[in-house]
Amino acid sequence: MQALLSLPSSLHGHSPIALLSPKGVARKEEKKEQNQQLKWRKRTLEHLAPPLMAAILTLSSPVLCFEKPALASEGARLFQKACIGCHDMGGNILQPGATLFMEDLQRNGVSSEEEIYNVTYYGKRRMPGFGEKCSPRGQCTFGPRLQDDEIKMLAEFVRTQAELGWPKIESYGD
Ligand code: HEC
């Protein structure tokens, strides 16, 4: 087969192998057909290219809207860094009635993103504030403060997690 294919084209028709061996002829025919098919496929691909591109663009557009999960994973990362010590899996080790589950958030009037932001920024009773302008000092974390946009991502993350019933954070990947 290989040998047959590598024969110079002028010899093709007269190749003794091809003439004598029906198998060789059959193979040659097969090859021709394949070539034909390839050509045809190439042509169809060329024709299909614009609609294909359109389809690919349509299919990939949700990818462009993946801002949310990206945000969520950044929020998850921050949460694991700053909040998990007291709020592992959305709980509250210092105050069982003030978990980050929707029921508690609602009862305590902290269920909107804005309210979660404020609690996280300024703190509340035994919850330390993480905002850069948090005061008085005693109400604020002794650890590093967070940027406003980081607190915003945290608030969004906490609110989303509460809505979903606190699924495992690992599911966000990193
Ligand atoms: C040192 C422990 C501690 C850390 C760290 C901590 N919290 Fe808290 N958090 C608390 C306590 C205690 C409360 C309850 C405050 C209250 O209402 O008296 C609370 C309450 C909250 C609430 C309101 C919950 C409710 O049901 O009323 C939110 C939202 C919250 N924390 C978010 C965060 C976020 C986000 C972080 C990380 C940036 C964080 N917390 C870090 C201790 C902590």
Image: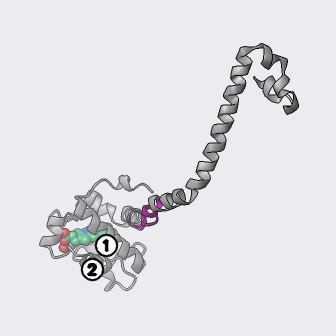
Where disc 2 sits, the SS reads helix
Instruction: Residue 26: give x, y in percent of width and height.
Output: 69, 21
Q: Residues within 10 Å of mark 1 (few under 14, many from 20)?
A: many
Name the one closer to the observer, 92 or 64: 64
Disc 1: which residue: 155
Mark 1 beta carbon near ligand 1 (under 8 Å): yes
Where disc 1 sits, the SS reads helix
Label 1 amino acid? Ala
Q: Which mark is residue 30?
A: none
Q: Residue at x 50, y 61 (%)?
A: 54
Name the one closer to the observer, 158 or 67: 67
Q: Main secondary structure of the magenta part?
A: helix
CB under 8 Å between callouts 1 and 2?
A: yes
Name the image quarter holding the C terminus. Answer: bottom left
Disc 2: which residue: 114
**Residue 161 in which image quadrant:** bottom left
Instruction: Report the residue that reaches farthest toward the left.
Output: 107
Name the one closer to the observer, 109 or 93: 109
Q: Which residues are the magenta region?
A: 60-67
Apparent side of residue 57 relative to residue 13 in the rendered image (left or right): left
Residue 93 visible in the snapshot: no
Which quarter of the frame holds ligand 1? bottom left
Residue 125 visible in the snapshot: yes
Relative height, residue 67 to residue 166 (above, below)? below
Q: Residue at x 20, y 73 (%)?
A: 111
The answer to if 63 sits in the magenta stretch is yes
Instruction: Residue 83: give x, y in percent of width and height.
Output: 33, 65
Relative height, residue 7 to residue 18 (above, below)? below
Tell which circle, 1 or 2, labels the residue nearer the N-terminal end: 2
**Residue 69 in which image quadrant:** bottom left
Name the one closer to the observer, 13 or 43: 13
